[in-house]
């Protein structure tokens, strides 16, 4: 109509369907990129933390693979094995599991776990050079053979000492444990003597004195040291050596601990 102003109409145009899809794609892409950035940052932080932690701990122990204990090499050139291998205890109250089988090889006329042979060779060579050669007089014994020795000792104590069978069994465990409960089933322990000497007087020989001073530097300790009979539940035996690794052996010597004491010490978080 004349004289009447027309109102301007503002129309709101809705985005087309194609524009909506583009916006959705852009948002999805931004979410994916943001998620990827978070993931990469998280992995980087985790990796940096693990590296810093390993450096602060002086490096971690090698893990076992395929059921076998892996090793690294020490500064002295000797293999280094994890404590799960070096510090296992075999005793009447802690028998070996069926799957804990040593990797046996023949050495010095007896069978031993092949993983201790490099250290043993160096120990025997050092003793030879020091003028007090050693000879290996005993090594691995199968559980069946050990059981037979145990039963023989029980019968001897009953017959010769007049012990009751229960008392004889308890006493026999202190010298000849049952099969599966003897150090000789680990392959890590062996008997030694002075070359050409009498086993009964070994504690008085130069060879024994050499071992007291030096065995730990090659990873070996006396399995049943004097003064620890109550702890080991085994009579003192100056001829029985046990491999525990150089670091553990030197620490045990420093602390004057037998194997049972040292394992408990480590389990409590010391060192």
Image (cartoon, rainbow, N blue to C red):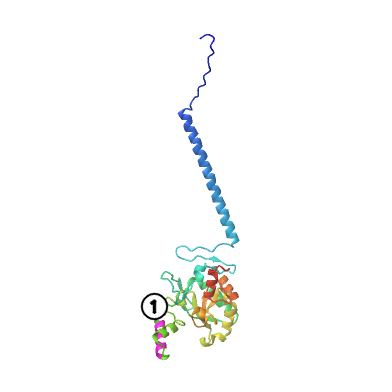
Q: Which residues are magenta?
A: 150-159
Q: Residue at x 47, y 27 (%)?
A: 16
Query: Which quarter of the figure is the C terminus placed in?
Result: bottom right
Secondary structure category for the residue under label 1: helix
Across and down, in percent, residue 110 comes to 46, 78
**How many callouts does the rendering have?**
1
Is 218 above or below relative to 154? above
Q: Is residue 49 above or below residue 99?
A: above
Q: Is residue 158 visible?
A: yes
Image x and y of residue 197, in percent: 53, 86
Residue placed most toward the observer, 120 or 155: 155
Which residue position holds label 1?
A: 144
The residue at the point 48 percent across, 35 percent down is 24
The crowding category of the residue bearing disc 1, from other C-alpha atoms within 10 Å (few below 14, some 14 to 19, many at least 20), is: few
Q: Which percent across, then down, holds residue 53?
A: 58, 58
In the depicted structure, whether residue 140 falls above or below residue 21: below
Does residue 154 appear left or right of residue 208 in this picture? left
Q: Residue at x 43, y 82 (%)?
A: 170
Give the camera-side residue of 242 and 36: 36
Please name the predominant secondary structure of the magenta segment in the image. helix
Q: Is residue 150 left or right of residue 210?
A: left
- Picture quadrant where residue 144 is located: bottom left
The residue at the far top in this view is 2
Among the 4 quarters of the image, the one containing residue 56:
bottom right
Is residue 191 in the magenta section?
A: no
């Amino acid at each position: 109509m004349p004289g009447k102003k027309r109102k301007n109409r503002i129309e709101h145009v809705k985005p087309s369907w194609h524009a909506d899809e583009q916006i959705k794609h852009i948002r999805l892409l931004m979410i994916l990129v943001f998620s990827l950035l978070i993931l990469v940052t998280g992995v980087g932080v985790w990796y940096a933390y693990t590296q810093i932690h390993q450096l602060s701990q002086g490096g971690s122990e090698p893990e076992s693979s395929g059921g076998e204990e892996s090793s690294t090499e020490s500064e002295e050139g000797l293999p280094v094995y994890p404590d799960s291998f070096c510090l296992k205890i075999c005793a009447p109250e802690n028998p070996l599991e069926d799957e804990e089988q040593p990797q046996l090889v023949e050495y010095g006329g007896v069978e031993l776990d092949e993983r201790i042979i490099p250290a043993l060779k160096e120990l025997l060579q050092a003793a030879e050079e020091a003028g007090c050669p050693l000879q290996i007089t005993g090594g691995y014994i199968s559980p069946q053979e050990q059981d037979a020795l145990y039963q023989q000792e029980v019968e001897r104590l009953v017959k010769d000492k007049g012990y009751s069978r229960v008392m004889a069994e308890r006493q026999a465990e202190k010298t000849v444990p049952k099969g599966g409960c003897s150090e000789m089933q680990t392959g890590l322990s062996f008997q030694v003597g002075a070359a050409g000497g009498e086993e009964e007087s070994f504690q008085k020989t130069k060879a024994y004195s050499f071992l007291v001073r030096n065995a730990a530097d090659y990873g070996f300790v006396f399995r049943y040291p004097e003064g620890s009979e109550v702890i080991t539940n085994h009579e003192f035996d100056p001829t029985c050596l046990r491999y525990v690794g150089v670091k553990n052996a030197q620490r045990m010597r420093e602390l004057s601990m037998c194997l049972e004491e040292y394992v408990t010490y480590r389990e409590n978080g010391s060192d």
